[in-house]
Amino acid sequence: MAAAVAVAIPVLDGGAVLGETLAAVRGQRIDREVELLVADSGSTDGSRELAERAGAKVIDVPRGQFSHGGTRNALMAASDASHVAFLTQDATPADEGWLAHLLEGFDLAEDVGLVFGPYRARAAASPMVRRELDAWFASFSPNGRPHVDRERDPLAGRGPRDRRAFFTDANGCVSRSAWEQVPFRQISYAEDQMLAHDMLSAGWSKAYHPAAAVIHSHDYPPGRLLRRSFDESRALREIRGHRAHGGPARLALVVQRNVRDDLGLLRSQGLPVHRRAALVPRSTAHHLAKAVGAALGSRADRIPGRLTGMLSLERREGFDPQC
C-alpha cells in the first residue's frame, strides 16, 4: 500500500540526536501510514544502521554527490506519498502531534503547497538563541493561529526579513502535487527558501502552523557563528537580493538593541542584576559576530572568491546569484 505521508531526513554522522529524532518520528500519533526515508551520505558512526533499525528506507548518496536541493528531490522521488515532511538529523519533533499538525496546514486552503512549523530551543541553549528563535517564529503568527502566505499578499514582505519567502526543510512538509510542478533547485544553500520563492511565484501558497514544533537550535562560538551568518546572508542575497545593514553605526545599533532585549528576557525571568550583567560580554560577542557575518555575506559579490571560502562555514567560494 502506498504511504499517505513520508518523513524524510538527510543524514551524515547524526550521532545520538539522530536516534532521538527517529524515535520521535516513530512515536507520532496519526491516522495514516507513515513511511520513514533517510538519505545517508557515507556515515561512519553507525547512523545508517540506526536508521535501518528504526525501519527507514535508506538511500545512499555519495558524499561528493550530495546537494541540499538535489538530495531532497531524490527523497521525494523515492516515495509516492502525497506529502513528504522534511527534518534534519538534529531536529526532533517536540511532541506526538507534530506530523498531524503539519498536515493540518494543507487543509487551510486548496492551493497550499508547503507547510512549516517553528523551532524551539534545546534546554541548554543560550538566552540569545532562545530569544531569537522565539521572536522570529512568533512573527509568523502574532495571534498564535495558523497562517497562509501568498505571493499577492501586500503585507507579507514588509520588514528587514521577508517573512513571505521563508520556509524551512528542517521542519517543513511538501505537497507532492506542488513539488511535481516546482521541485527543489540544486543550489548550494537556502534551497528551502528558494523553493518557497519558486512555489509562491508559480501560484502556490505556503502555511505556517505554530503547533508543529521541533526541538532544534545551535549555539555557535563567535567565530563559527560569523561564518554561519556569512553563509546564510550570502544565500539570501543570491536568491532574493537581500542586503544586510553594513555601516559601523548601524551595526552598533543592531548589537545594542539585541543585547538590551537579551537582558530584558533575563529580567522578565527574575534573574538578579549580577546574573544579567554576566551575560553582557557573551551577548555582545554573539550579536556582533552575527551582524558582521550578515553584512559580509550580503556583499559576497564584492569579495574575492578565495576569501569567501575562508569566511564560509561550508568553505564554499564565490557568489552564485539566482535572481
Image: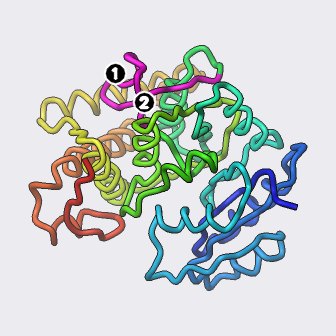
State the mark number for residue 163: 2
Point 27% across, 30% down: residue: 254
In this orientation, which residue lies closer to the viewer: 242 or 249? 242
Q: Is residue 20 above or below residue 170?
A: below
Residue 279 shows in this picture: no
Is residue 151 a member of the stretch shown in magenta?
A: yes
Amino acid bearing label 1: Arg
Left or right for 13, reference 218 = right
In this orientation, which residue lies closer to the viewer: 182 or 88? 182
Is residue 294 a member of the stretch shown in magenta?
A: no
Disc 1 is placed on an element classified as loop
Q: From which residue to which does the magenta span run?
A: 146-165
Image coordinates of residue 57 in percent, x first then y, are: 75, 72
Q: Principal SS element in the magenta part?
A: loop
Point 36% across, 31% down: residue: 162
Disc 2 is placed on an element classified as helix
In the picture of the structure, the residue carrying the numbered disc 1 is: 158
Quadrant housing residue 99? top right
CB atoms at circles 1 and 2 under 8 Å apart? Answer: yes
Q: Residues within 10 Å of mark 2 (few under 14, many from 20)?
A: some
Image coordinates of residue 81 in percent, x first then y, are: 74, 55
Image coordinates of residue 92 in percent, x first then y, are: 69, 52
State the mark number for residue 321: none
